Image (cartoon, helix red, strand yellow):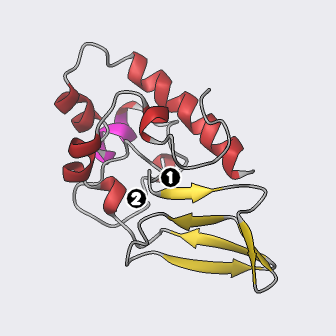
Amino acid sequence: MSYLAWFKRHGKKHAAVMRKLTHLSDAEVIAYFRYENMVKHEPDFCPLYKKEKKCHTMETLNCYWCACPHFRFDDEGFEIIDGKVLKSYCAVNAKEGRQIISGDVIHQDCSRCLLPHKESVLQRHFSRNWFETMRDVTPQKTSS
C-alpha cells in the first residue's frame, strides 16, 4: 500500500471516530485517544489493537496522530540520493528517527520516536481535524 493510500484511509477512520466525539471537550477527545481506551472502544482503528500490542513502549501512549505531522512523504520520491529514491523523511530531524534503505528506496524510520504520541505535544497542536494537523506531510492533496 502506498503512503498516500494509507494516509487517506487512516484519515477517514479518524474522522469517523471524531464524528462520535462531538459532545466532548478537546481535553476529553485527547483522553479518548489513549491506547487503553482505543483498544476497548475502537478495535478497528489500528491493526495492533487486536493483538493488544502498542506501536511504541510508553506509559501513556496517545493514538490521536498515529502518524506524525513532521513526517514527510511522496510516493513518487522527493529526490535521488546516491542512486536511491528518497520517499520519506522527518521535517524536524528528530534525534530518535533514522533513515533506512530498502532496495533503491530511502524511507524514514520513526519507530523509536515518541514525539507524536505524547499528550503534551498533542495539546499544543491539537485540532479536531486530523487532516488539518497533517496538512504538510505530503506535497500531494491529502484531504478526503
Tag of residue 48: 1
Percent from the top left, x then y, of residue 32? Answer: 27, 33
Quarter-of-image position of residue 96: bottom left
Q: Are marks 2 and 1 in contact (CB under 8 Å)?
A: yes
Q: Is residue 20 above or below residue 92?
A: above
Tag 2 residue: 54
Q: Is residue 97 above or below residue 129?
A: below
Q: Which residues are magenta?
A: 35-40
User: The residue tagged with tag 2: helix, strand or loop?
Assistant: loop
Find the distance from the CA under tag 2 to the CA under tag 1.
Answer: 7 Å
Instruction: Specify the amino acid type for callout 2.
Output: Lys
Magenta span includes 39: yes
* Residue extending furthest toward the bottom: 82
Q: Badge 2: how crowded within 10 Å, few (<14), some, or many (20+)? A: some
59 or 121, nearer to the observer: 121
Q: Badge 1: how crowded within 10 Å, few (<14), some, or many (20+)? A: few
43 or 92, nearer to the observer: 92
Q: Is residue 13 above or below residue 57?
A: above
Magenta span includes 60: no
Q: Residue at x 29, y 54 (%)?
A: 61
Which callout, 2 or 1, points at the residue further toward the start of the chain? 1
Q: Residue at x 41, y 16 (%)?
A: 19
Percent from the top left, x then y, of residue 139? Answer: 64, 47
Q: Residue at x 54, y 49 (%)?
A: 137
64 or 79, nearer to the observer: 79
Instruction: Specify the amino acid type for callout 1.
Output: Leu
